[in-house]
């Protein structure tokens, strides 16, 4: 319960995670079905209250591990949402994060506070608890913008990939088709990619060079 100190309200603080992956050629977000009130049975973003002595980043990492079952993935702080009416229990401010997880890296998460979870296409989201639909819409907008001027897409890629697979990932996130020649020229000119010296020999397509990102640190492109 919130208290007053010196005439000022002492609100609760939570973290909420907009977690993205790409599967079946769709950008998908992880939603959990709440197992407690408020909004019992409603879909929501995975999240939780900040614990005593815990930083925001530590809380986000804890939620990621507890409710998703992964660690060491790309995550960044998105925005702070503080509408006084966003939580029916009391005044609660939430700090939202974006997390990116390659589909093949996902385990089966478990949580006592999550009745069910699902990965849903971002353009087919159901009604969400609290203000989570607004948070998700903002997160998708930020992700698409950042893809166009940084190497953030590395958070969704396998360690090694064909340039055609990288282009497909961009097209899925941006929801737009890209010119193959221009995309290849631009990506190779950025200096972000290394040739692995190996070729992909699987499938019916012709062998193609495999690439990897030189760094997982975010680099902004011109």
Image (tube, rainbow, N blue to C red):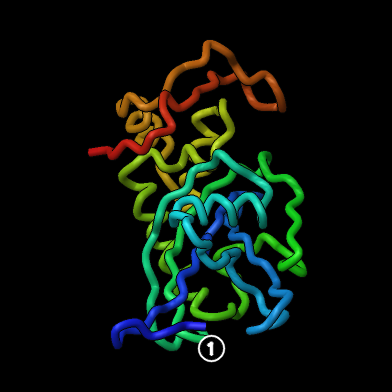
At 69% from the left edge and 74% from the top edge, which residue is drawn? 34
Which residue in the protein does label 1 denote? 88
Q: Residue furthest front?
A: 6
Q: Quick check: 115 left or right of 75?
A: right
Is residue 138 found left or right of 100 in the rendered image?
left
Q: Position of residue 50 (x, y in %)?
A: 51, 64
> Is 130 displayed left or right of 178 in the figure?
right
Q: Residue at x 49, y 25 (%)?
A: 212
Considering depth in this image, is 208 or 36 the residue closer to the camera? 36
Label 1 Cα crowd, 10 Å radius (few <14 / some 14-19 / many 20+): few
Q: Is residue 156 above or below residue 145?
A: above
| Of the pair 161 and 178, the residue shown nearer to us | 161
Work out whether residue 41 or residue 119 is closer to the camera in this orientation and state it.
Answer: 41
Q: 104 above or below 35?
A: above
Q: Is residue 24 visible?
A: no
x then y, percent, for residue 53: 47, 56
């Amino acid at each position: 319960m919130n208290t007053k100190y010196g005439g000022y309200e002492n609100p609760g603080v939570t973290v909420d995670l907009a977690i993205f992956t790409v599967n079946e050629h769709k950008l998908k977000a992880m939603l959990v079905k709440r197992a407690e009130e408020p909004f019992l049975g409603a879909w929501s973003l995975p999240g939780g209250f900040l614990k005593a002595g815990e930083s925001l980043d530590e809380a986000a990492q804890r939620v990621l591990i507890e409710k998703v079952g992964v660690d060491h993935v790309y995550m960044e702080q998105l925005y702070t949402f503080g509408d006084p009416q966003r939580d029916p229990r009391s005044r609660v401010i939430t700090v939202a994060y974006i997390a990116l997880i390659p589909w093949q890296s996902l385990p089966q998460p478990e949580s006592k506070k999550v009745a069910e979870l699902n990965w849903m296409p971002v353009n087919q989201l159901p009604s969400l608890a609290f203000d989570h639909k607004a948070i998700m819409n903002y997160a998708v907008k930020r992700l698409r913008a950042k893809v166009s001027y940084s190497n953030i897409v590395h958070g969704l890629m396998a360690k090694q990939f064909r340039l055609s697979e990288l282009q497909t990932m961009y097209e899925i996130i941006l929801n737009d088709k890209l010119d193959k020649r221009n995309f290849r020229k631009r990506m190779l000119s950025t200096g972000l990619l290394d040739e692995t010296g190996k070729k992909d020999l699987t499938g019916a397509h012709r062998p193609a060079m495999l690439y990897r990102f030189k760094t997982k640190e975010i680099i902004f492109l011109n």
